[in-house]
Image: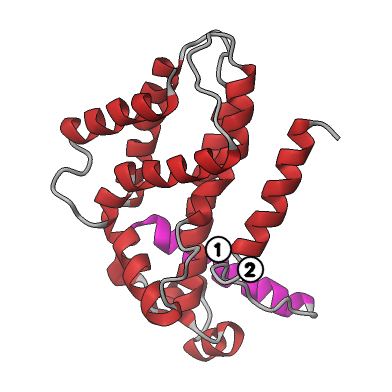
Amino acid sequence: MGLRDLLRLFFYCSYFIMHKNLEINFSDPKQDRSKKTLDDLLEAAYEIVESADTAKFTSRTLASKSGYSLGTLSQRLGSVEDVFFWAIQRGRKSKLNAFINAMEQFDAQLPIQVFIDKYVDIAFGNMNAVTSKVMRYYDQRFTLKHGLTTDYFDYIDVLIEPYLELCQKNETNTFRVLSLEEARLIFKCVLMLGERPFANDDPIAGTEQHRQIVVENLIRLLAK
């Protein structure tokens, strides 16, 4: 088993162990009709969340959007609030997967400065698309209901394996080689530098000053 396979095994195991308290799941219906109802409700919730208007994260909006009654929502979902948590998590996973795909396609002949500039711009674009209101909604409502678990920010860990593979493939000798543990801690720092100002409604969020702070510190942390 090679290094890449070992990395994949490590992250596969750790991801599902560490995130068992954070993932929102719904019981798998046995009947096709019930499955369609659940799929319709989840898709409607996702579309509502993508609109980024937290005032619409309600059972009435979900009922209107999906075409199902409030009684059906309560019976099928239990907690309507959880379906919006699920939808927010789905959107976050989608954006992280897009990052992973972009890392895998990054030109091995380009230096780390190009990588950092490109992906900070992508990240800031994602933050503006999601809006800080949605992140604050999730932070406030999810932690109120489930508590602030020790693995609350571990969703960023899914980027570590593809980043370490990118470091190995790059031919410019500008990417600093990181251990798994160092990468894990650095990526938490990246999260605090880049995403959390948006979630905390910090006035600096999304400004050119904010971008420069993130870029300069990533170069210090990741470049040779």
Amino acid carrying label 1: it is Glu
Q: Amino acid at mark 2?
A: Asp
Instruction: Estimate the x, y position of residue 51 in percent, counting from the top left.
Output: 36, 56
Q: Residue furthest left?
A: 203
Label 2 near label 1: C-beta < 8 Å?
yes
Question: How far apart are labels 1 and 2 at the CA level?
Answer: 6 Å
> Looking at the rendering, in which quadrant would you find the N terminus?
top right
In reply to whether residue 47 is colored magenta, the answer given is: yes
Position of residue 19 in the picture relative to residue 59 (left or right) = right
What residue is pinned by disc 1?
Answer: 43
119 vs 201: above or below: above
Q: Residue at x 39, y 30 (%)?
A: 221
Q: Is residue 186 above or below residue 69?
A: above
Residue 101 shows in the view:
no
Q: Which residues are magenta?
A: 32-53
* Residue 204 vs residue 150, the one in the foreground: 150
On the image, numbered disc 2 is attached to which residue? 39
> Does 172 sit left or right of 55 as displayed?
right
